[in-house]
Every structure is written in structure tokens, then in C-alpha cells.
Image: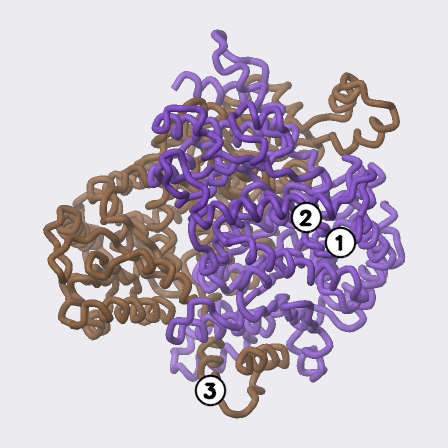
Chain colours: A brown, B purple
């Protein structure tokens, strides 16, 4: 047994779960009129109602006991202070510094990270101002109408998600995002663009990420097929990278290489120069509002006591279901069409962070860690997979997110959207009992035999947990807070699980094997260096 | 105990699982050079390699024993014959008839469904030909350049998924899809369109689906704000519905109401008139190729023996992991950028079908049913959530899908894409042992202390199951086969779980409660008819 699962806090929670498993939330609401007030709180622009969870005050107190046992507060301070908590890579973890307006020096290896952040933000501002104002000209003297971000994972998902969410704030140039090495992604994107008016932002820290560089080189060829001269490349390509040599070799001017640092993990890099494509379409003022929204959540996270700390509460509720109710998944359901990429973004953030099974001490875990995060926008999900949430067998804890006001008001649309938002968490919690379903069927005048046949299918057990998160409206500011909320939630869970949320060794093996396969592509003999399945598939593909 | 979990086949599998849990696939491949041949098969345009599963020949034989015990073959025949197997709604289940070119009558309640299908297909052909050729004119005499499909769930996800997948086959008009009642969806879509050149396809069987009708009415207003006269509505709105009265009241000509029937479930309706928007952009010839691809899979499913039956094999492998390894999820990972909506589509198909917990006999199940289906396109996922697949704690069985040839060839892109496709299933299966990781670290010349610290994080346990599905290229034909494959897989799982895959009572309660909330929106008093959480959130929203 690990020290976690044999710890007093863990054992108390196991005991407590046995009591709670038998209790229905509907009763808890009936018994305690104060439940909503007790289990809700605000942080910055976000209101969280977590009263529709299978918890009592005792549950919360036991969960916070576990958090204290895992020294959550101490670790939060270590992160903000720039300690090298990403110990397998010997790195500090300072995405919070990217949005902290403070000018007090924060030193990592003798370097003031705040100074560095200010420099790059200022470089981003002058560049985005120049492109957006039309001062920056392409090789024919025309202005830039389209930006194509070429990047993968953290160099893609964050800016793409935010650009879609904030479409109403985005002006010219339009932003496009190409990530997949599948040629279809680049081909389909470039089909509608013109080289003379397109700017490519190539995002790769090392400037060697194979997929990104392959896309960048194909984009370069597409551009040159029209522009003819390599001397025009600096007008149409910029880089988000630290590899000055490779960037220059590509033809990009070193003045237009935007840096970031090893204390910014890919999946936490939206706030750095990786946000450049977003800043280009959004403008630097609104980009800064997003940073400020995140900073507000940082301050809350850093200073609020655990029992009033929104990321901590959400993290511990997750632990409750994953480790004590055997939930393998967590659904995120924004009631906002603009947030259609939010789930993809969170998938990387949470699953790449906590999809680990070795502790900080190098021991295998004997408990579940990261859950599969999935979901999508409401009301669409209601007409797709919500059946399983309501009547399926797996327990799926869910976060419902909604803006009180629409950015694109239209008739009664928003009222109906929010009615559904409210109704779904109500339905999941209360269910429909046998006697309620029976009464309904009886009143419909159905025959006795049909009624008996149908009745079991019309019942809902309810007691399915959800959080409701409200924001006033979806703006750069509130989006910034929301993202930071999930970042910190993810971090807190990693602390309880005693894993490193900031490395990602699990992506290495596939890369390594892919390189081996590529090297064999043109071999004359049949390939036999793999298992028979991989060999067999490979030969089918090569011969086709 | 249910009759399922107390059945001989089930108990044998439970026993067998104990042996299999300790065995590593890497060893199985070493021991049996014939494994790839044994565990692979073709059906229509699809090749399936299922050798990278935690199975032996005995496993397959026990799983097929379970399938036989559940009378899978008999139920397959009942479905194709038009028996009313959707018994809670007293309906036949005949999406297969939508793609069956046979002219032999197939009677349901005395009606020849094949005759009906032919009529509607012919109506679709003359309409799509007329719009695509430019013969159909809008109210200013211009041709139609854009089609907006307004529908939800099954009236949206299928055509939207296919239109994106087959972008290279789509010509004019362009197809857009509006589903969410969030006004942003319609507003953002119409922003770039012109009323005189836009055709709306309103898809709602009853023509009363609230979200769809709200979007349709707002689209109608947008159109009329320019066109001025209601007499122009029939030129710009058509309906996929059965409610002639409501369709006419909306202003749509009954000649342009395209029917479907109650033996076509929403999530199985892509093949019916619900595919009209797709057929408009694809052309009816290619739409028919898609039907033919599905029909080819139907014939395979109907006639192949269970041990060579691709949908049956996939279904039983799913059962193996869900019911005997406690997997709550299943990942689908197409290595094709065009298939970016495939997962959303399958989410409805599988989770709305099998997210049930009451048997056909009306008893609660005592075993897991439908899993959470999730995933997305590769290579993107590799840079996002694959960390969890490789090193996380939950077991996530995965389907990897790839086309051998690209529709948009570009340099070496496709070779790199496929190298990654091959490498990922290899990595998941074999892992990287302690000694392999050690040898690598030693050869890197790392210090002993760093090495010891890093080593556990660089190991991969492997033994993670996947299926590889190959198609020659992504065409209407192969896409049709793929979709039918998952339809039938889903059906077979429902047979083993003894549930009705074709109803969806679980979506009713939320709808019902949402109507209640809407009715209270303008109440003067504070709302108190719900639990305190719903009341509290509602008041916060109303007051904001």
C-alpha cells in the first residue's frame, strides 16, 4: 500500500464513502434548506455552485483534511515562488508569472522572469499593432488579412480555443490553425487564402517538432510558389521558438522570433508568446484582459483558505469521485457555442498533466490518477450523449458552465439555453422516482400492460453529481479566469496523487517508434523488426 | 444476480479474465508468429487488425459463446426482417432498408418500406439536381450558393460529420450546420451569408423540436428582413419532417417536405432524407455511393458467421474490456483530419443507444453497459491526451483508423501520418520495460543519481489494447461502411447487455424540467419550486 492509501485522511474517506453511497441528494436538499449557500462560492468573475454533489459538510471537511495532509498550500507557494517543482525536468513552473503584472523581480537561476515576460509582451504588442494597423505589408505591399498558426498540442489548442470562444472580439486579421501532419489540414486551410496577404506563425519551442516543421515547410513552398523569392519570407513567416539558429535557417528574421522559456510548459503556454496568433486577431489590449482574468484567479488560488478556494474545492470533488466512487471520466459541458473547443483544450491540460502512474518518489501508484475528460457544448449534448449521463451505468461527474448574458443576443434563444442549463443539473440530481413515473403514466391514460412494460424505462435514479459555473458573459477576462481555474484544479489533483503534473514522458515512446518506422519506409525487404501486427499492417500499407 | 451475470458464458469469461489479466501481449506475439493472421479480417473496404488485444483464441471463443448465448444471430435477422425490436416504442428498426437497393417488398404494418425509400430518394435526387444545376432560383433570380441545415442530434451530427469528412467531394452549394439554441451558432453562421443565395433545410421529424424551431424561426426573420415577402419562403426553406400541417404553417411548400419514418431512429437517420443537406453539397451520385458502402457492411453483418463478423468481433472485444476489465471508456482515433467530427457523431450513436440500465425485461442491470466514447484525430491527440493512454491508470481500449492513401497528397505528410499511426499501437502494446529504459538512460551517459530518479518515469507498462482499421482512402463508400460498422457494433453490444438500443427515454426528464423553468422565467416572486440550488442559480440569472 502506498503512503497515500494507508494515510488516515484516505481511510476516513473510504469509510465515509460507504455511508454516502447510500444517500440521495434529493433528501439532502430537503433536509438542509441552507445547502445552496453552504456549498457555493465566488472567485473573480466565476460563481461556483457545488451543492449538487454527493457530499455533506463532513465530506468537505474530510477532503480538505486530505488536501492538508498532502501539503497543498505549501506546494501552491512553491509553485508561485519559482521552485523547481517539475523535478524530472529540473524546471520551475511559472505560467502564473506570465500574467502577473507585478514588477517585483522573481528570480529563477538568477534571471528575473518578470522582466523577460515584460520584454516579450512588449515585442508582441509592437508586432501585433503593426500587423493590425496595416503598417506591416506583405511582399506585394498589401496588408495581412489572414494569420495561419502552425503548431501542435499546447502551441495550437489554447490559441485556437480562445480565438473561437472570443470570435465577437476578434477583428482583422482572421486566425486559422493548422496542427495535424495530415496534409488535408494545411491543404484545406490554404485553399481559401492568398500568399500575399497571409502571415504564418510557426510555433515550436525547439523548431524541430516534426509535424509542425513539415507543415511549416509545405507552407513555405506554397508561399514561394507564388512569391518566388526567399527574401520575402521574413515578411510572411514569424516564429515562436527559442532556437535562433533553426529559425534563421528557415528564413525568418531573428527580430521576429518570439521567445518563451522552459518554466512554461506547452499546455500552460497560451499566456506566453504562444498566444501570438490569438493576440493578432484579438488585439493586445484584449489579450491583456485575458491575462488579467487569469491573474485574478491566481490571486484567489494563492491567497484563499482551502475551504473557500475554488480550484481546491473542484480538485477535491474530482478526487472524491475518481478515487472513492471509481469514476474514470469527468464531463465538461459549456452552454456556450463559442466554447466548442474548450473540451479539447482541457483534455490536453488535464490528461497530459495527470495521466501518470508513478509518484514523485518513483513508486507505482496503487490508486487511480487522471480521469478521461470529455464533453462538449450544450444544448447539443442533450440530443446526443446525455442519455448515458441520465440513465447509463457509469458515474460521470460533470461541470456545467454558462454565461448569464449572451454576446450575440437573439430573441429568446438565451433564455431557452439557460433554462436547459438549469434543468439538466436539476434532472441529474433529482431523477424521477418509480412513483413519480407511475403517476405520470397513469395520468396519460395508458393501458395497464403497456404501463407495466414502460415504467422501468421511464424512471431516473438521479443522484448524479454536477457543478454549475456561472460567468456574467464570455469575455477575454472571464475566459482567462476559467482557464486558470482548471489549470489550478489540475495541479491540486496532482498534489494529492503525488505525481508530477508538468512532465510528459509518456509521449516519447510513440515518437521514438515512429522514427524507426519512417526509416524503414523504403526498405526493399519485407519489414520484420516489429511484432507481426505492426509488420503486417506496415506491409499492407507499403504495398497498397 | 441477473440471468446474464449468472450465465455459464459470463462466468467462464470471469474465470478466464483472471488468467489473462496477468499476461502481456508482447509475450503473446513472441509465442505465436501467426497471431496477426489469426486476429484480422476484411469486410467490404475495411481491414481490421485486432491482434493487439488482450486475447487468445480461447478468449475469442468464450466471447462468441456469450454472443451465441445472447442469440445475436437471431436478433440480427429480426432487425433486418423489420420485427418491432424497439419494443418500448413498438417500432421496427430499419435504417438498413434505407441503403438496400433490393426491390423485393419489405412490409412493416402492411407498408412496403423499400417503395417508400425509393420515393424519397427520387424526390431528393430531383431536388438536389435542381439546386446544384442552378435551375432552382432564389427570390432575386440568383442561384443557391449556401445551404444551412437547422437540426439537432441525429438531424445534425451525421450530415455535418460526413460533409466535413468528404470536403474534397463537396462542390457547390456549401453546407453549414446550425444546431445549438445558443444564438451565437446562428448569428455566427449567417454573418457571412446572403439571404438571396441561401437555402435553409429545417430538420425536425415532429417539426416541434424547440431548439430547432427557434433557430428556424430566427432564420426566417433574418430572411424576411431582406426578402420582405412571405411568398418567397418556399424558395428558401425546405423541411425534413412528417408534420405536414406545421411545415405548411411555417410557409414551406408540402412538395418540399422530405419524409422519414418511425422505423428510422434519429441517430441512424443519416441515410434518409436527413442526409439532404449533405446530398445537396455532395450530389446524389456520391450520396448513393455512401449508401452502397453501408449496404456492403450490412450484407457482411447479416451473412458472415460470428467468428468472421467484424461488427460482432468489435462488439465482443468492447464487452471484454467494459465488463471484465472495468473499462468505462472507449477511444476512437481516426488518423484523418477530415474525420474530426467522427467522434461526436459516434458519441450519440453509441451513448444514446447503450446508455441504459434497465433490461428488455424491465429489470435493473447488475453489469456495466455503454461506455463513454471519446477521442479525436491523430496526430493531434498524440500531443494532447495520449500521455494518459500510455502512462495513465485507466484502461482505455482504442480504435485507430487510417486511410492508406490521402485525398490531398502533399510531400511526405501522409507517410509521417501513417508512421505515427503504426507506432502508437505498437507503443501501447509493447511498452518499454525497466531494462529497456535503463539501457537507454545508461547509453545517454547520465549520472547514476539522475538516472535512478528518472528511470521509473521513463518506463511504459504497455499491454494496452487497440484495434487498427485500415481503409484504402476516405470516400463516400468507405465512410458509409465505417459508419455502418459502428452502428452494428453498437447493436450487438445492446444484445449482450439485453437492453433496447433504439429508445432514448433518458432525454425526456431534462426537457420536461426545462419547460417548467421557462414557464417561470417572468414570475414576479422569487422562484421556489425547485431544490435550493436550482432556485438559487435561477434567481441569480434572472436578477443579473
At label 3, counting other C-alpha atoms closer than 10 Å, the crowd grade (few under 14, some 14-19, many 20 or more) is few
**Same chain, labels 2 and 1:** yes
| Relative side of A112 to A300, left or right | left
Instruction: State the residue in front, B369 or B182.
Output: B182
Q: Position of residue A392 (x, y in %)?
A: 68, 41
Q: Tags 2 and 1 in contact by the CB under 8 Å rule?
A: yes
Residue under numbered circle 1 = B103
Residue at 40% x, 81% y: name it. Answer: B444
Q: Position of residue B505 (x, y in %)?
A: 70, 34
Secondary structure of the residue carrying numbered label 1: loop
Residue under numbered circle 2 = B118
Q: Tag on residue A522?
A: 3
At label 1, counting other C-alpha atoms closer than 10 Å, the crowd grade (few under 14, some 14-19, many 20 or more) is few
Q: Quadrant of residue B519?
A: top right
Q: Quadrant of residue A480?
A: top left
At label 2, counting other C-alpha atoms closer than 10 Å, the crowd grade (few under 14, some 14-19, many 20 or more) is some
Amino acid at each position: 500500500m502506498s503512503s497515500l492509501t494507508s494515510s488516515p485522511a484516505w481511510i476516513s474517506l473510504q469509510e465515509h464513502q460507504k455511508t454516502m453511497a447510500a444517500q440521495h441528494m434529493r433528501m439532502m436538499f430537503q433536509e438542509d434548506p441552507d445547502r445552496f449557500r453552504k456549498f457555493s462560492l465566488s472567485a473573480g468573475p466565476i460563481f461556483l455552485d457545488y451543492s449538487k454533489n454527493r457530499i455533506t459538510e463532513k465530506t468537505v471537511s474530510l477532503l480538505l483534511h486530505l488536501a492538508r495532509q498532502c501539503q497543498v498550500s505549501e506546494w501552491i507557494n512553491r509553485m508561485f515562488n519559482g521552485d523547481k517543482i517539475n523535478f524530472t525536468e529540473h524546471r520551475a513552473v511559472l505560467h502564473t508569472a506570465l500574467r502577473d503584472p507585478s514588477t517585483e523581480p522573481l528570480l529563477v537561476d538568477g534571471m528575473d522572469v518578470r522582466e523577460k515576460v515584460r520584454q516579450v509582451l512588449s515585442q508582441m504588442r509592437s508586432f501585433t499593432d503593426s500587423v493590425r494597423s496595416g503598417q506591416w505589408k506583405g511582399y506585394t505591399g498589401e496588408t495581412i488579412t489572414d494569420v495561419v498558426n502552425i503548431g501542435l498540442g499546447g502551441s495550437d489548442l489554447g490559441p485556437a480555443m480562445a480565438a473561437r470562444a472570443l470570435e465577437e472580439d476578434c477583428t482583422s486579421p482572421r486566425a486559422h490553425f493548422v496542427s495535424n501532419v495530415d496534409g488535408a489540414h494545411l491543404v484545406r486551410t490554404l485553399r481559401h487564402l492568398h500568399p500575399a496577404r497571409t502571415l504564418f506563425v510557426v510555433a515550436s519551442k525547439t523548431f524541430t517538432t516534426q509535424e509542425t516543421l513539415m507543415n511549416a515547410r509545405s507552407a513555405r513552398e506554397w508561399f514561394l510558389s507564388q512569391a518566388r523569392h526567399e527574401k520575402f519570407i521574413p515578411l510572411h513567416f514569424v516564429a515562436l521558438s527559442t532556437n535562433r539558429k533553426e529559425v534563421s535557417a528557415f528564413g525568418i528574421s531573428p527580430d521576429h522570433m518570439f521567445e518563451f522559456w522552459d518554466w512554461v510548459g506547452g499546455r500552460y503556454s497560451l499566456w506566453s508568446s504562444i498566444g501570438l496568433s490569438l493576440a493578432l486577431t484579438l488585439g493586445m489590449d484584449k489579450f491583456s484582459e485575458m491575462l488579467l482574468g487569469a491573474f485574478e484567479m491566481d490571486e484567489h488560488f494563492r491567497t484563499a483558505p482551502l475551504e473557500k478556494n475554488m480550484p481546491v474545492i473542484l480538485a477535491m470533488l474530482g478526487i472524491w469521485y475518481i478515487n472513492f466512487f471509481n469514476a474514470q471520466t469527468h464531463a465538461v459541458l459549456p452552454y456556450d457555442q463559442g466554447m466548442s473547443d474548450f473540451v479539447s483544450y482541457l483534455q490536453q491540460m488535464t490528461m497530459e498533466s495527470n495521466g501518470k502512474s508513478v509518484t514523485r518518489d518513483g513508486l507505482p501508484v496503487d490508486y487511480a490518477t487522471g480521469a478521461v475528460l470529455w464533453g462538449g457544448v450544450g444544448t447539443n449534448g442533450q440530443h446526443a450523449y446525455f442519455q448515458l449521463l441520465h440513465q447509463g451505468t457509469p458515474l460521470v461527474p460533470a461541470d456545467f458552465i454558462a454565461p448569464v448574458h449572451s454576446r450575440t443576443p437573439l430573441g429568446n434563444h438565451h433564455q431557452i439555453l439557460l433554462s436547459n442549463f438549469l434543468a439538466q443539473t436539476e434532472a441529474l440530481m433529482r431523477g424521477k422516482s418509480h412513483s413519480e413515473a407511475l403517476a405520470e403514466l397513469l395520468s396519460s391514460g395508458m393501458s395497464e400492460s403497456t404501463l407495466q412494460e414502460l415504467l422501468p424505462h421511464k424512471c431516473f435514479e438521479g443522484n448524479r453529481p454536477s457543478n454549475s459555473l456561472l460567468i456574467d458573459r464570455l469575455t477575454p477576462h472571464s475566459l482567462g479566469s476559467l482557464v486558470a481555474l482548471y489549470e489550478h484544479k489540475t495541479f491540486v489533483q496532482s498534489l494529492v496523487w503525488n505525481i508530477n503534473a508538468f512532465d510528459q514522458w509518456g509521449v516519447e515512446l510513440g515518437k521514438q517508434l515512429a522514427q524507426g518506422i519512417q526509416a524503414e519506409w523504403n526498405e526493399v525487404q519485407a519489414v520484420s523488426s516489429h511484432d507481426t501486427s505492426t509488420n503486417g499492417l506496415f506491409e499492407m500499407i507499403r504495398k497498397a
